[in-house]
């Protein structure tokens, strides 16, 4: 069983921290009166439930904002590694330019979508009574200026602090303790980041093994192959400490999928089962 190298060199020159800050108006409103009516009708206690109204039903211009946010968050989590429990994530230098270009594009789309929404918002409010009927209350709808302040899309970068970068006047002994504490924290965070990468890799390989199993051909999408190929690329770009085990895994997965296409796997029984065997060997040989 292959194990991961636990030596942790500095990564301040090969990675940075990035935080994606997005907020949006949900278009939901708690209706206390309806909540109370439902609780009474069901003979439940007063805190048994809450009824939240959807203020803008079936409004594609408004729904487009949430769609863009979802795409941006998915890309952000896919191309970065965890660092803090929440907030900033680790972005490697090889990933930076693609990340910056893609997130800037999402930011521009988000801003355009918000502007389109605010422009059409008065008409949406006028259409709402015909959709909500007795649930409609004009007071639930903020004015356009208030709404604009509820939408935000920020991308913030920061360096990864090194263990020695403590500039506080606490005395030599306390400073040494702070440095030791951060060194341990730094080591743990990097290992957690790598753990996330290994788990992602294991997930796509296990999925491939499952779909290639059995004599009866299982239906699978082209992404079964492309997702693994994508992880090969990410293993290279995420390997900020040049970990030899991660390099070895990358090379072996790349070799196992050399020349493999979804079409070939569907048409060639031998290739499909041979590919499964190679994938199963990978799942067995590394400490995922």
Image (cartoon, grey):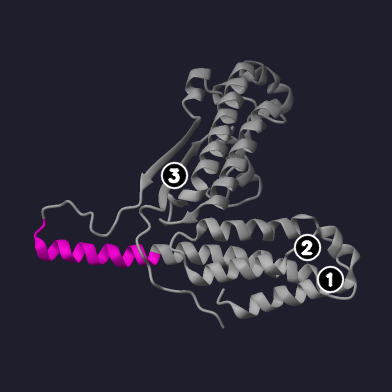
Say which of marks 3 and 1 sits in front. Answer: 1
> Looking at this view, is 250 or 207 the one in front?
250
Q: How crowded is mark 3: few (under 14 residues within 10 Å), some or many (20 or more)?
A: some
- The vertical placement of 110 against 188, above or below, is above
**Image position of 48 with respect to 23: above or below:** below
Task: First in sequence, mark 3 or 1: give its number.
Answer: 3
Q: In this view, does 279 lie above or below 11?
A: below
- Measured Cα–Cα span from mark 3 to mark 1: 43 Å
* Quadrant holding the N terminus: bottom right
Q: Which residue is drawn at 77% across and 71% down?
A: 275
The x and y percentages for residue 15 are 42, 52
For residue 260, the mark is 2
Residue at mark 3: 19
Residue 271's mark? 1
Q: Is there any visible trace of residue 286 in the rendered image? A: yes
Say whether marks 1 and 2 touch (CB < 8 Å).
yes
Whole-number angstrom distance, CA of label 1 to CA of label 2:
9 Å
Q: Is the C terminus in the top left, top right, bottom left or bottom right quadrant?
A: bottom right
Which residue appears at 11% of the width and 53% of the height? 169
In magenta, the rendered stretch is: 170-188
Indicate left or right for 96 with 212 as reference.
Answer: left
Give the side of residue 127 with respect to residue 100, left or right: right
Q: Quadrant of residue 53?
A: top right
Structural crowding at the residue carrying mark 2, measured as other residues with C-alpha within 10 Å and reported as few (<14), some (14–19) or many (≥20): some
């Amino acid at each position: 069983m292959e194990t991961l190298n636990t030596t942790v060199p500095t990564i301040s020159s090969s990675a940075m921290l990035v935080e994606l800050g997005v907020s949006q108006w949900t278009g939901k409103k708690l209706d206390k009166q309806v909540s109370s009516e439902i609780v009474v009708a069901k003979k439940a206690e007063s805190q048994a439930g809450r009824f939240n109204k959807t203020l803008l039903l079936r409004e594609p211009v408004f729904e487009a904002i949430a769609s863009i946010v979802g795409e941006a968050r998915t890309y952000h989590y896919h191309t970065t590694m965890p660092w803090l429990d929440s907030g900033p994530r680790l972005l490697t230098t090889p990933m930076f330019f693609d990340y910056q270009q893609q997130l800037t594009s999402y930011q521009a789309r988000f801003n355009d979508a918000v502007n389109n929404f605010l422009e059409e918002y008065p008409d949406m409010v006028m259409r709402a009574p015909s959709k909500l009927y007795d649930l409609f209350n004009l007071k639930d709808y903020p004015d356009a200026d208030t709404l604009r302040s509820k939408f935000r899309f920020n991308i913030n970068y920061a360096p990864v602090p090194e263990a020695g970068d403590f500039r506080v006047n606490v005395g030599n002994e306390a400073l040494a303790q702070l440095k030791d504490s951060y060194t341990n924290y730094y080591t743990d965070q990097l290992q957690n980041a790598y753990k996330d990468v290994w788990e992602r890799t294991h997930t796509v390989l296990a999925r491939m093994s499952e779909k290639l199993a059995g004599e009866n051909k299982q239906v699978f999408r082209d992404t079964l192959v492309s997702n693994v190929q994508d992880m090969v690329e990410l293993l290279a770009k995420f390997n900020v400490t040049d970990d030899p085990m991660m390099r070895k895994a990358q090379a072996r997965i790349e070799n196992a999928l050399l020349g493999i296409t979804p079409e070939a796997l569907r048409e060639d029984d031998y290739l499909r089962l041979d590919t499964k065997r190679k994938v199963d060997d990978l799942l067995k040989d590394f400490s995922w």
